Amino acid sequence: MSFWNGPVVNGFFSHNPKQGIGLCASFYKAGVKVVSDTDSGGGGSHGVFPLVLDAASSRRMRQISAHGRLSKVRWSPCGMMLSIEMNAKLAAPSDLAIEFRGVSYCINDIPGRPIVSDVSLSVSRGETLVLLGRSGSGKTTLLRLINRMLTPSQGQVLVEGRPTTEYDPIRLRRGIGYVIQDAGLFPHFTIAQNIALVPTLEKWDSARIAARVDELLRVVGLDPAEFSARRPRELSGGQRQRVGVARALAADPPILLMDEPFGALDPVTRAELQLEFMALARRLNKTIVFVTHDIREALLLGQRIALLHAGRLVALASPQEFLRLDHPEVHAFTASLTVSDGVTP
Amino acid sequence: MSPWNFFIEHRSEILSATFDHLTLVLIAMAFAIAIAVPLGMLIVQHRHLRTIALGAASIFQTIPSLALFGFLIPIPFIGGIGRRTAIVALVLYALLPILRNTYVGLTGIDPAILEAAEAMGMTNTQTLLRVRLPLALNVILAGIRTATVITIGVATIAAAIGAGGLGTFIFRGVAMVNDSVILAGAIPAALLAILADLFLAQLERRLKII
């Protein structure tokens, strides 16, 4: 790097055709400012293309590659970046399952005190993102904006690259799993009927529904013969929550939204379910947005943690990075972690 | 003449008056349920209609029963002397308990259940018919029970406008200052009300889900 002192670095990146256009936008999100992109014209082409970066961006690019978020980075002997390939975590927009673009939400669209203000954030396919925050920080609102139970007052929420406002809300919701605290099972339905809710609404034939219900009960660790015909009130809280997860998975949605799903459980059952759930989430490769106010849960389950405070996104980091962040609200949460650690014998 | 002897002697008249009374109540209740339950379902989603419907039903309930019968007599088509006027009045009287309980039952569902229904992609109609209505059934039935007991009582007054029923004995007994005749109407009416209440309470218990 030493021989060169100018504001820009010349580099090249190899353009993976599968990632399509929008590479510059992805770099930008990662903190890399592309001054000039000579590939701006040829969207479908691939190969090695020159890329001009400024000095700060070049440093950032090196940091990113050091964190393993870029692969196959080749640097010239004089410090110029020759070529890179991006891995899934720093992907083009088409690989994003969910994207918030400058989203604000006010009740009844009345400006004033918004519940969510100017949130931009994206979730990659297969990622588990935890929305962490105190009560009233807007995390549940953010979740409900994804399946259009709420519509943004400003900005856009994109699901699979399309704004939620372009979807029929009923169709959108049937394609997204949803798990809430206390499960919210229908008390007048049997366990099997509860799990079969979306397939029934989608008018699957009954043999396929029955097979799917059995399969899902096994997936969440409940014996179909024992539980299918029971009613929710005959189950323990942990069992009900398992059924809640099974119901959300019924139509095999690519995205799963979870709103403090383990919040009402006793600590032992909660820990059990968290571990099982984590294994399940990895195995099924779902995109998961998980709301919690429990920093331990966030650190355990999240691949990234988005911290919300008074409706704003104040931090977005991996669990390891999160603990090192310097922000008062992050300190507040990490402090609660230390306090409860002190109490534990 | 002791009431008991009067009962034995006039048992066929009392029985037929009881039957008239019961049919009067059943017809009125059938109309009241047919109006109030669908209306209750409708006002869950229509706020303006809710205020009007609940308000109107409350007003009918407030009017003293004899006055309500009196008000209806001069009204063409539905009014006049006889059973039809009585049935109209009884229906108006029975509306409020059924309407209010239907509304309360449909809206008093655990919010987590409604949130799940919405998030799973159920339409409003599907939520109403498959979730709210089955879960509200026992509350609605409690309203029907209250309305039935009220209607059995108010129907005795319907005799004043020539609708027949057990009230006939009561009014006649008062005019004749004859306790036996009064009791011949009052006892079967009271029994009818108690039995209807017990029967519907039983049904309500069976429909209770949680």
Image (cartoon, helix red, strand yellow):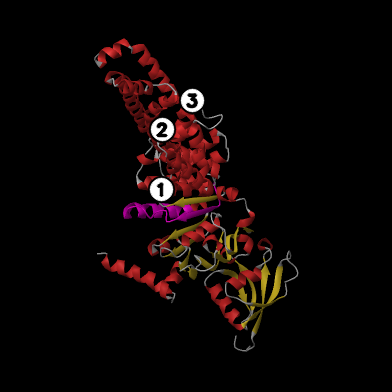
Horizontal and vertical percent position of residue A320: 44, 69
Chain letter of the residue beneath label 2 in the structure image = B
Question: Residue lying farthest front?
Answer: B176
Q: Is residue A135 magenta?
A: no
Q: Tell me what residue is drawn at x 51 percent, y 43 percent.
A: B127
Q: Determine crowd level at label 1: few under 14, some 14-19, many 20+ residues with C-alpha closer than 10 A.
A: many
Which of the marked residues, 2 or 3, is nearer the chain's N terminus? 2
Q: Which residue is mark 3?
A: B81
Horizontal and vertical percent position of residue B115: 47, 50
Q: Is residue A84 above or below residue A165?
A: below
Q: Which residue is mark 1?
A: A241
Q: Is residue A106 left or right of residue A226?
A: right
Find the magenta span and give its range.
A252-281
Q: Is residue A108 left or right of residue A335?
A: right
Marks 3, 1 in one chain: no
Describe the element under mark 1 as helix, strand or loop: helix
Q: Is residue A78 left or right of residue A143?
A: right
Amino acid carrying label 1: it is: Gln
Q: How many marks?
A: 3
Q: Tell me what residue is drawn at x 49 percent, y 47 percent.
A: B51
Horizontal and vertical percent position of residue B6: 29, 13
Please indicate, yes or no, whether residue B94 appears anywhere in the rendered image: no
Q: Which is nearer the eye, A182 or B62?
A: B62
Q: Tell me what residue is drawn at x 27 percent, y 21 percent.
A: B179
Tell me the quarter of the picture where residue B185 sits: top left
- Number of the front mark, 3 or 1: 3
